[in-house]
Amino acid sequence: MTNKQVLFEVKHHVAHITINRPHAGNSLDLETAKELADVSLEIEKNRDVRAVLIRGAGNTFSAGGDVKAFAGQKDLSRYLREMTPHIHLAISRLVRLDAPVIAAVEGAAAGFGFSLAISCDLVLAAESAIFVMAYTKIA
């Protein structure tokens, strides 16, 4: 798997997922949503995975949706309708795993990042961690 927005590897039975968009606060765009869904399928199929660790590259877990990518869309509604099933699929697969899913949160976990973190079985929060729903502030 040659992802660039989402890094993935399994070491010692632990699946490591890293949202790899530090330049954008590890925010979610369509490509990242697709890659996260693909990674969740790989984990679901891998019987050797005993735990999953999710983190963001750099010092932010995830700032949520990529509002710059959203602003660049001619048809934002269509873009979000295309993106949403990938997000739901990824979270649904991760939630149903027999292996515990752990979020390692540094910095902001906002919007989607907040949702991803609270969908995990355990959240390890650094002192820098900030949890924000953010959805109401975008409207």
Image (tube, rainbow, N blue to C red):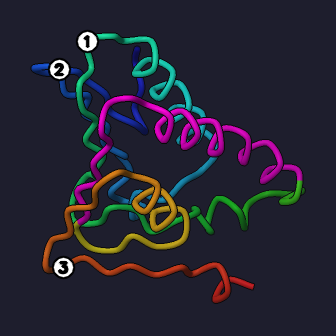
Residue furthest front as drawn:
98
Would residue 72 be found to the left or right of residue 8 on screen? right
Question: For residue 78, which numbered disc appears in the image?
Answer: none
Residue identified by numbered label 3? 128
Query: Type of residue at label 1?
Result: Asp
Region in magenta: 78-105
Q: Main secondary structure of the magenta part?
A: helix
Tell me: residue 26, above or below residue 94: below
Residue identified by numbered label 1? 48
Residue furthest left as drawn:
12
Query: Type of residue at label 2?
Result: His
As helix, strand or loop, the secondary structure at mark 1 comes to loop
Residue name at image x 40 percent, y 36 percent: 6
Would residue 15 be found to the left or right of residue 127 on screen? right
As helix, strand or loop, the secondary structure at mark 3 comes to loop
Q: Are marks 3 and 2 in contact (CB under 8 Å)?
A: no
Residue identified by numbered label 2? 13
Query: Type of residue at label 3?
Result: Ser
Would residue 73 be found to the left or right of residue 21 on screen? right
x and y percentages locating residue 69 in the rendered image: 64, 59
Between label 1 and label 3, give the one nearer the viewer: 1
Q: Marks 3 and 2, how far apart in space?
A: 28 Å
Classify residue 133 by image quadrant. Answer: bottom right
Taking the magenta stretch, the answer to whether it contains residue 87 is yes
Tell me: residue 41, above or below residue 119: above
Between label 3 and label 2, give the one nearer the viewer: 2
Looking at the image, is mark 3 or mark 2 earlier in the sequence?
Answer: 2
Residue name at image x 32 percent, y 42 percent: 101
Tell me: residue 89, above or below residue 66: above
